[in-house]
Image: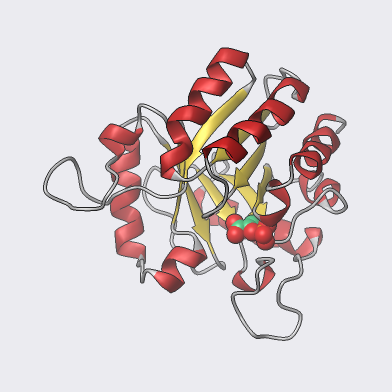
Amino acid sequence: MKNIWIIANWKSNKNIQEALDWVAKVGPQISKEENLKVIVCPTFSALSEVKKAIQVGNFPMLIGAQNLSSFGIGAYTGEEPAAILKQFADLAILGHSERRKNFHETDEMVAKKVEQALANSIIPLVCVQNEETPVPKDCNTIAYEPIWAISTGLTNTPGAGRADTPEDADKVAGVFKQKYGPQLEIIYGGSVDSSNVEGFITQENIAGVLVGNASLDAEEFLKIVKACEEI
Ligand code: PEP
């Protein structure tokens, strides 16, 4: 049975109390299933408390960071090194289009971040924007997120802020598998919600969803998880 990753990317949202309220609502409702990988990615400052809440509740969830430093421990003011983040994070979202756009992250920086993540046993989840985005060496999990499909509308193109079709996302995922090998797991991201999630996760080449806006609401996120559990 293929893995189904359901990853909540909260971006710069939720203070610690809001994060804990969400975990208290979502955690007890998630079924323990080997292939279901539910991961929440809070802000750096909420990671520690969210991790504690998940451990205390014994919820079948993992924790992700939304970024990490391309450097190690040392004199890098303001950076979060993987060697420290590994206390909290099982996974890190790397090369998100918002980071590429707003913080000028390049493919080279993303490749260095992947190296840091792997050296510290953090799963790198690299966001690729189209078939041309390179997948760094030894990275086996990517999120195909066409920029125009992100719900907040990173582009002004007509149709922006709407999900890709499951069929098109599957085709792109197939191209990545052909290029990099069958071990690569491809997650789809971009305007996923409870009404369209089933279409994506039932595609042959798609192994889950990365959810931004719709993950902020605990009830809506749970509906997404339940839809995946029923497949
Ligand atoms: C994202 O930005 O990673 C994302 C998937 O956002 P949204 O679901 O809001 O389109």
- Pick the front one: 153 or 157: 153
Position of 158 relative to 227 (above/below): below
Towards the viewer: 85 or 168: 85
Residue 97 shown left or right of residue 144 in the figure: left
Left or right side of 72 for 165: right
Give x and y (percent) for residue 121: 36, 30
The residue under the point 55% across, 66% down is 129
Q: How many labels, in total?
A: 0
Give the residue displayed 36% in from the left and 66% down from the top: 105
Residue appearing at x 11%, y 49% in the figure: 75
The image shows residue 135 at horizontal and vertical percentages of 44, 55
Q: Does residue 158 lie above or below 32 as drawn?
A: below
Q: Quadrant of residue 58?
A: top right
Q: Quadrant of the C terminus?
A: top right
Colouring chosen for the image of the structure:
secondary structure
Left or right? Give the position of 16 relative to 76.
Answer: right
Q: Quadrant of the N terminus?
A: top right
Is 26 drawn above or below residue 15 in the view shown?
A: above
Q: Where is 67 relative to 86, above or below? A: below
The spot of residue 155 in percent (x, y) is 61, 80
Front residue (pair 91, 222): 222
Residue found farthest to the left = 75
Whether residue 34 sits left or right of residue 44 in the image: it is right
Q: Can see residue 174?
A: no
**Ligand 1 lies in quarter:** bottom right
Q: Residue at the location (50% across, 69% down)?
A: 132
Q: Quadrant of residue 144?
A: bottom right
